[in-house]
Image (cartoon, rainbow, N blue to C red):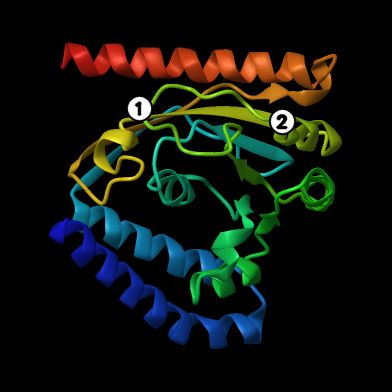
């Protein structure tokens, strides 16, 4: 637990310093690259201090209308993927995160999309994200909607698949393996170790008859990637 709080303190200190240094530059240039550069350097520092090694398998596409859909095992997942993905992907994030001092400001400036509870509010968030996606902004989403307590896949929510179809996007399934062991859900424990991020071949959302068929294909790809990573982990 001491290790967790020490790394958390360093992370928040970096966040405050990053805001102080990067915000004026961003306000002058309005370039997302400034915010993402600051964020990715901070994530790299976090991973180094935590002793977390990331193995990337496959290569995500660069540019275009892309929705990256990943399983969700840990709070480590979003920063690891942001550190790994090319470009400046936006994220559908819980509204509560936008209320966190410092972090909420950065999320708004980076044009991340808040998702509130309630069917109508969620639909508005999906419509906003779809408009951004059609304009060429890639998205990172977690179809489970919450973290898995044991690494096994939870049921998928359909809203992100509506987003992919409305945005006429390519969908890239992503399998994250090992993060739940390093920072488990509901436990203040951060361990060193390895996380495997496996990118699967893109799926064209327009090729599927409905969101349920797209959901099934994405889930099958992510599940297969988790099984392969587990087999490789057991063999090592």
Tell me if 215 is positioned left or right of 15 in this view: right
Q: Residue at x 62, y 20 (%)?
A: 218
Percent of width and height locating residue 136: 76, 49
Of the residues under marks 2 and 1, which one precedes in the sequence? 1
Asked if the residues shown at circle 2 and circle 1 are in contact, with their CB atoms under 8 angstroms apart, the answer is no
Label 2 – label 1 distance at C-alpha: 29 Å
Taking depth in this image into account, of 9 and 85 the one nearest to the observer is 9
Which structural element holds mark 1?
A: loop
Percent of width and height locating residue 182: 25, 40
134 vs 231: above or below: below
41 vs 146: above or below: below
Percent of width and height locating residue 112: 65, 59
Q: Which residue is mark 1?
A: 150
Tell me if 145 is positioned left or right of 67 in this view: left
Q: Quadrant of the C terminus?
A: top left
Q: Residue at x 38, y 47 (%)?
A: 76
36 vs 185: above or below: below
Q: Residue at x 74, y 40 (%)?
A: 65
Q: Which residue is mark 2?
A: 170
Taking depth in this image into account, of 227 and 4 the one nearest to the observer is 4
Please state the total of marks drawn on the protein image: 2
Crowding at dot 2, Cα within 10 Å, few <14 / some 14-19 / many 20+, comes out as many
Q: Residue at x 71, y 35 (%)?
A: 160
- From where the camera sits, is residue 85 visible? yes
Tell me if 228 is positioned left or right of 204 in this view: left
Percent of width and height locating residue 190: 22, 49
């Amino acid at each position: 637990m001491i290790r967790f709080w020490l790394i958390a303190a360093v992370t928040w200190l970096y966040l405050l310093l990053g805001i102080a240094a990067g915000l004026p530059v961003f306000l002058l240039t309005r370039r997302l690259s400034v915010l993402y550069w600051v964020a990715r350097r901070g994530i790299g520092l976090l991973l180094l201090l935590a002793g977390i090694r990331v193995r990337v398998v496959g290569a995500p596409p660069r540019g275009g209308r892309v929705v990256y859909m990943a399983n969700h095992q840990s709070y480590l997942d979003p920063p690891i993927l942001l550190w790994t993905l090319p470009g400046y992907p936006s994220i559908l994030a819980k509204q509560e995160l936008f209320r966190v001092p410092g972090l909420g400001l950065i999320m708004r400036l980076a044009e991340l999309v808040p998702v509130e509870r309630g069917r109508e509010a969620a639909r508005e968030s999906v419509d906003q994200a779809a408009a951004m996606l059609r304009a060429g902004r890639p998205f990172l989403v977690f179809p489970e909607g919450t973290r898995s307590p044991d690494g096994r896949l939870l049921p998928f929510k359909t809203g992100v698949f509506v987003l992919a179809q409305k945005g006429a996007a390519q969908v890239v399934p992503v399998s994250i393996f090992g993060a739940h062991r390093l920072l488990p859900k509901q436990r203040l424990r951060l361990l060193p170790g390895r996380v495997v991020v496996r990118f699967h071949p893109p799926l064209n959302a327009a090729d599927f008859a409905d969101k349920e068929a797209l959901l099934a294909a994405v889930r099958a790809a992510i599940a297969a990637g988790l099984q392969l990573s587990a087999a490789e982990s057991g063999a090592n």
